[in-house]
Image: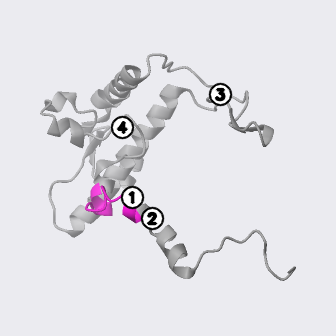
Amino acid sequence: DPSQDMAALPLDVGEIISFVNINQKVNTTNMQDSPFTWMERGEIGYSPTYNDSTKKEEGTSEEDVLIPNPFIIKIHFEAAILGLETLIRAENASYDPHDRSYPAPTSINPTILPDLYLGWGDAKVTHTQREVLRNRLFAVLFTKLSSNYHKKQQNDDDLFIVCMNGTNCTTPDEFLQA
């Protein structure tokens, strides 16, 4: 019968809804934390990360934390980047801070699509690995400073501070102006 779609899956509404909720059923480990808690951490999408909460739990000293509070640009900026590079080298011995290459392309399905690959080929990245870490660090600092808006609204005095050019910055716009 040409009026029926032969490619359609025989699923009813209940089965479709169960597929929509499968992510919540499988990944429930981080649901107890509020978005503001995640924002306060600064960064969560990378491994290793600048996030210092796991380091504090392990009982390391304040000097071992990659992003201390207050964060003094002259003292802590390069130290944070070098510290994260040390963590990356522990996971990947072939890490090169001056590398500009993308990972090698991977074949999607050599049987069905023999010439289709996922990746950038021989294209070069616009930033070195160290520049990427620097940009990530700026993003973390701005995110942590942004979480101060919520803390101020809650009358919380434990604000994240970035010291730059003699100015104690507690908001992203103060940091940009410093």
What residue is shown at x 45% (from left), y 64% (from top)? 22
Who is closer to the viewer here, 73 or 40?
40
| Label of residue 104 in the image | 3
Q: Which residues are magenta?
A: 24-37
Identify the amino acid type marked 1.
Val
Of the numbered discs 1 and 4, the one sitting upstream in the chain is: 1
Please state which of the two labelled residues, at mark 2 or mark 4, is closer to the viewer: 2
The residue that disc 4 covers is 49
| Label of residue 35 in the image | none
Of the numbered discs 1 and 3, the one sitting upstream in the chain is: 1
The percent position of residue 19, horizontal first and vertical second, equals 51, 68
The residue that disc 2 covers is 22
The percent position of residue 87, horizontal first and vertical second, equals 35, 25
Q: CA distance from mark 2 to mark 4?
A: 27 Å
Identify the amino acid type marked 3.
Ala
Local packing at callout 4 (Cα closer than 10 Å; few below 14, some 14-19, many 20+) is many
Answer with the quarter of the image where residue 119 lies. top right
Q: CA distance from mark 3 to mark 4?
A: 23 Å
Looking at the image, do the residues carrying marks 1 and 3 touch, with CB atoms under 8 Å apart? no
Local packing at callout 3 (Cα closer than 10 Å; few below 14, some 14-19, many 20+) is few
Q: Is residue 28 left or right of residue 11?
A: left
